[in-house]
Image: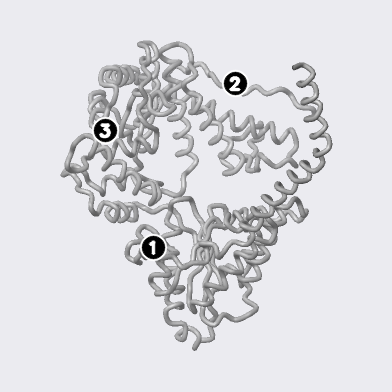
């Protein structure tokens, strides 16, 4: 048996030694066949989806709310597509491209769809990332096919979303295959926009980008993207119109006032407002209500701005610290006459252990130096309350301090709102702090000026809270008892203490300064 096993093993080994090269060649041939099949399926595919006219329900012009300025600039584009002879008789040339830029969710895609619907032309859409492929030349071919199909329809709108994915600024260094592919796609897009061959009809390109500063300059010159339209978040009237448009089909409770909601949602985009209404409807449905109540929408807005309510529980000491911290924020805000606090909560939400929410009195686009200083005082009110009551500071103020640092740097380095830092009363520093051409001394002066602002704001916060300690204790006690205080609850506490505008008395005791302005000396 052993002899037979040895002979058999020897024969098998001899067989594999003789046929091993053939097996290797056959295996490599199979791998090559699989690779070529994949290449063929990738490169030889039929027309991609991006060259087909959109068959989705068109967006009517009246459905686009809250972006009236952008609609006015795009109205003549729609009019041109609908009646080009009226403009051609005056010798006007159609705009080759329109660039819509602004924050995400402001309605850039809806505007492009509305232009096509208003003009009654085909709508072709594509994403900038769909033109950047692994294989060089594939993206450029897609762009050619897209414009070819659009020209066949006579009049059309081509919409390119996230233009910066393919139209980012070129480095000019060649680079790897991916970079070469993106540059070839960008060059093809530039050629199509130039329109060396006159279109049989009229094709207008509308593109959207959230980062217009990152686009290649060749894209932005006249003759390619002739117009650049800012699509900004809506104002109060626009927010109310958006809310009413998205509230159709959603039963609203008698206590839900959309005008009041529009006032409290400053800075929110149309997409955020639509999502808040949808979340409010889900919350109402989960609670078994037949109509969306005010508390449902308030909860939806809180989830968007702060986060969902967390299950973690704080111990009694931590609850007391958080209560005084948030009471310090709310009290400073009331004393300084800033936007009134709407809610104070010590219930953990998202990463926050507590929060104070406020609603702006009106939409504002400029802030004075005094208003920014008051904002600094409010941000440091939580840390000041901890020091005033507990005698020490805690790590919960990390987000507040980060925002104070950012705001102080902006006030000094960008807005020129610093303080004199030498005996001769030099003017406030107004230089960008990220400019590496600045000397070490200038950078040190900027840091000193910024820290001086924070130091003064902290001194004012400690003084305000020390002078109103009874109100601070009352706010914290109510927060510990009820966990969440509404606008009515806060106003009741403030009214009980007769609070209004308060000026820090010259005879009040100055609190100890917790922010040091000492910096290491620099080499002159």
- Alpha carbon distance from label 2 to label 3: 36 Å
Residue 448 to residue 97: above or below: above
Residue that appears at 57% across and 44% down: 415
> Label 2 to label 1, Cα distance in Å?
61 Å
Residue 487 image label? 3
Depth check: 290 or 31 in front? 31
Front-most of 398 and 186?
186
The percent position of residue 346, horizontal first and vertical second, equals 34, 23
* Res 524 seen here: no
Residue drawn at 41 percent across, 74 percent down: 119
Numbered disc in front, either 1 or 3: 1
For disc 2, the neighbor class at 10 Å (few under 14, some 14 to 19, many from 20) is few
Disc 2, SS: loop
Q: Nearer the viewer, residue 23 or 75?
A: 23
Q: Classify residue 500 as left or right of residue 70.
A: left
Is residue 337 among the parts visible in the rendering? yes
Is label 2 or label 3 in front?
3
> In the visual, does 321 lie left or right of 228?
left
Q: Residue at x 39, y 63 (%)?
A: 56
Disc 2 designates what residue? 516
Q: Quadrant of residue 133?
A: bottom right
Identified at 49% across, 28% down, the residue is: 399
Q: Is residue 242 left or right of residue 350?
A: left
- Tell me if mark 3 has few (under 14), some (14-19) or many (20+) residues whose alpha carbon lies within 10 angstroms of its own: some
What mark, if any, has residue 56 been given in the picture? 1
> Which quadrant holds the C terminus?
top right
The first of marks 1 and 3 along the sequence is 1
Q: Along the line of sight, which residue is nearer the eye, 7 or 504?
A: 7
Q: Are marks 1 and 3 in contact (CB under 8 Å)?
A: no
């Amino acid at each position: 048996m052993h002899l037979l096993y040895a002979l058999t093993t020897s024969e098998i080994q001899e067989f594999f030694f003789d046929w091993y090269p053939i097996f290797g060649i056959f295996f490599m041939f199979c791998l090559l066949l699989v690779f070529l099949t994949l290449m063929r399926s990738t490169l030889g595919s039929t027309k991609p989806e991006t060259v087909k006219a959109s068959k989705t329900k068109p967006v009517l012009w009246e459905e686009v709310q809250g972006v009236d300025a952008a609609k006015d600039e795009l109205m003549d584009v729609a009019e041109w597509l609908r009646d080009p002879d009226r403009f051609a008789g005056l010798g006007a040339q159609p705009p080759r491209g329109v660039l819509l830029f602004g924050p995400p969710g402001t309605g850039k895609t809806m505007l492009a769809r509305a232009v096509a619907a208003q003009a009654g032309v085909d709508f072709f859409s594509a994403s900038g990332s769909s033109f950047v492929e692994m294989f060089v030349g594939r993206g450029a071919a897609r762009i050619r096919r897209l414009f070819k199909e659009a020209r066949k329809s006579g009049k059309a709108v081509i919409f390119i979303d996230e233009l910066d994915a393919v139209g980012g600024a070129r480095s000019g260094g060649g680079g790897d295959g991916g970079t070469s592919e993106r540059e070839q796609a960008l060059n093809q897009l530039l050629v199509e926009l130039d329109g060396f061959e006159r279109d049989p009809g009229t094709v207008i390109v509308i593109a959207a980008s959230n980062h217009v500063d990152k686009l290649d300059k060749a894209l932005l010159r006249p003759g390619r993207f002739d117009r650049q339209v800012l699509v900004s978040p809506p104002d109060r009237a626009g927010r109310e119109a958006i809310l009413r448009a998205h509230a159709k089909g959603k039963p609203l409770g008698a206590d839900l006032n959309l005008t009041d909601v529009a006032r409290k949602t400053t800075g929110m985009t149309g997409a955020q407002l639509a999502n808040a209404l949808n979340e409010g409807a889900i919350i109402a449905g989960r609670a078994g209500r037949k109509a969306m109540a005010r508390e449902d929408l308030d909860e939806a807005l809180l989830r968007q701005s702060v986060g969902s309510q967390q299950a973690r529980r704080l111990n009694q000491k931590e609850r007391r610290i958080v209560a005084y911290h948030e009471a310090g924020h709310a009290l400073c805000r009331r004393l300084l006459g800033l936007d009134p606090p709407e809610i104070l909560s010590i219930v953990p939400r998202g990463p926050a252990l507590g929060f104070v929410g406020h609603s702006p009195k009106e939409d504002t686009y400029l802030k004075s130096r005094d208003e920014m200083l008051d904002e600094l005082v409010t941000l440091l009110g939580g840390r000041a309350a901890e020091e005033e009551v507990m005698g020490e500071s805690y790590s919960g103020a990390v987000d507040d301090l980060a925002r104070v640092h950012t705001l102080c740097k902006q006030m000094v380095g960008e807005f020129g709102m610093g303080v004199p830092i030498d005996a001769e009363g030099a003017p406030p520093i107004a230089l960008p702090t990220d400019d590496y051409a600045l000397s070490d001394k200038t950078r040190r002066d900027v840091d000193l000026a910024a820290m001086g602002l924070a130091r003064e704001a902290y001194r004012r916060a400690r003084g305000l809270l020390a002078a109103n300690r009874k109100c601070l204790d009352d706010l914290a006690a109510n927060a510990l008892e009820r966990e969440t205080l509404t606008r009515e609850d806060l106003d009741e506490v403030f009214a009980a203490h007769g609070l209004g505008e308060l000026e820090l008395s010259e005879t009040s005791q100055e609190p100890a300064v917790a922010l040091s302005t000492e910096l290491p000396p620099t080499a002159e």
